[in-house]
Amino acid sequence: MFGINGPEFLILLVIGILVIGPKRLPEYTQKLTNIVKELRRMASGAKEQLKEETGVDLNEVDWRKYDPRQYDPRKIIRNALLDDEGGADAAAAPNAVAAAAAGAPAFAVAAAAPERTVERLSAGEKAPFDSEAT
């Protein structure tokens, strides 16, 4: 809390009590109590409004499902590559499943990739220049 540890907070609290004094302390305590009650009322009102608008009760939400620590990008990619409906070749999927079960990485099991054609310039030929590319 603002870089203040326990003993520092207690010292500030004692100094605050001494500065306020015993005459005004009940008044400030009552003001603090009213502020806390108002904040709680506003928070519960916001919860009720959210429940009415979305139809979801916050107490019934499984928050573990939304924990970002549970997502493993490798697992997501592996599942996407092994998914038959994801556009992968149906013939490559059984090989990928077998290789994944054997411990091979999913990217190493891809079906025969189409060959890339690389166009090379002949010796002494200048590279094309596009003045609008920048």
Image: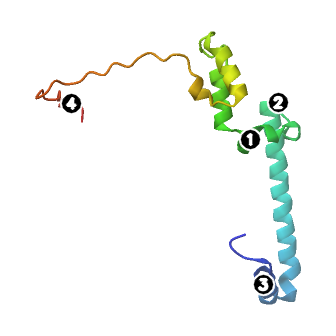
> How many labels were placed on the picture?
4
Q: Residues within 10 Å of mark 1 (few under 14, many from 20)?
A: few
* Distance between the alpha carbons at the discs numbered 3 and 4: 67 Å
In front: label 3 or label 1: 1
In front: label 3 or label 4: 4
* Distance between the alpha carbons at the discs numbered 1 and 2: 26 Å
- Which of the two discs, 1 and 2, labels the residue nearer the N terminus? 2
Which circle marks residue 70 in the picture? 1
Q: Which residue is mark 2?
A: 55
Residue 59 as seen in the image, left or right of residue 67:
right
* Distance between the alpha carbons at the discs numbered 2 and 3: 45 Å
- Which of the two discs, 4 and 2, labels the residue nearer the N terminus? 2
Q: The residue under label 4 is which amino acid type?
A: Glu
- Which of the two discs, 2 and 3, labels the residue nearer the N terminus? 3
* Residue 127 image position (x, y, % from top left): 17, 29
* Residue 19 image position (x, y, % from top left): 77, 88
At a point 82% along the width and 36% down the height, the residue shown is: 51
Q: Quadrant of the N terminus?
A: bottom right
* Distance between the alpha carbons at the discs numbered 1 and 4: 46 Å
Q: The residue under label 3 is which amino acid type?
A: Gly
* Residue 28 image position (x, y, % from top left): 83, 76
Q: Is residue 72 above or below residue 29?
A: above
Q: The residue under label 2 is which amino acid type?
A: Gly
Which circle marks residue 16 in the picture? 3
Residue placed most toward the observer, 85 or 82: 82
